[in-house]
Image (spheres, rainbow, N blue to C red):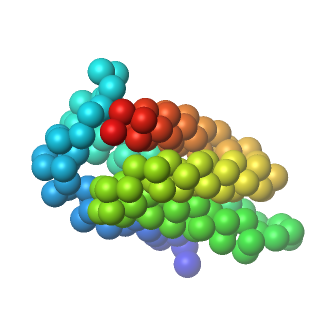
Amino acid sequence: MNKILKLISAILVCNLAGILGTFFVSDQVGTWYKTIQVPAWNPPDWIFAPVWLTLYTLMGIALYLVWNKEGKIQNKNFVILAFFLQLFFNFLWSIIFFGMHDLFLAFVEILILIFMLIVTMFNFYKISKASFVLLVPYLLWISFAAFLNYTIWILN
C-alpha cells in the first residue's frame, strides 16, 4: 500500500469512529441532553463537530506515522492494537453517555479511555515522537470531557 493511501486510510478509519458515534449523539443533543443540568462552562453544541473532526484527523496522522514507520520495531502490531482499543473506548463512550444515558458508567468508561490513550501515547512515543505530540490535544480534550462528564453526573 502506498504512503498516501495509508495516510488517507488511517485518517478515514479514525473519523469513521466519530461518524458512528454520532448515531448515538445527534438525536440526543436536541432532546435528552437539553433536559439535564450542565455546568455554566459547558461548551456550545456547535464546537464539538469541528473539534472532533480535527482530533480524529490528528489521531489518523499519528496512527499513520506509527503504521508507516519502517525498520524493525518491537511490538509494532501491539502498539497499533492498543491504538484501536482506545479508539473503541472513544466510540463506546458515546453509546454509554448519549445512548444509555448512564452518566456514572460513562465517567468510569472515559477514565479507562484516558488510561488507554496514555498507554498508546507512551508506546507511540517509542516509535514516533511526532505521533505522541499529535495525540496531546486529544488527551487534553478527553480530560476536559471527563471533568465535564463528572460534573454533569454530580449535577444530575
User: In the rendering, at what x and y percent does residue 39 appear?
Assistant: 33, 26
Residue nearest the viewer, comparing 97 with 20: 97
- Residue 91 at what x, y percent from top left? 43, 62
**Observer able to see residue 41:** yes
> Furthest residue to the top?
40
* Residue in the picture at 64% in, 39% down: 133
The answer to whether residue 148 is visible is no
Position of residue 34 relative to residue 40, above or below, is below
Res 49 → quadrant: top left
Q: Identify the residue at image location x=62%, y=63%.
A: 83
The image quadrant where one finds the N terminus is: bottom right
Q: Residue at x 34, y 22 (%)?
A: 41
Answer with left or right where residue 3 lies relative to residue 9.
right
- Towards the viewer: 77 or 149: 149
Residue 10, x across and y down, in percent: 50, 65
From the top left corner, tell me how far across and down residue 13 is, in percent.
44, 68
119 to the left or right of 28:
right
User: Which residue is rendered at x = 77% and y = 55% of the image?
Assistant: 123
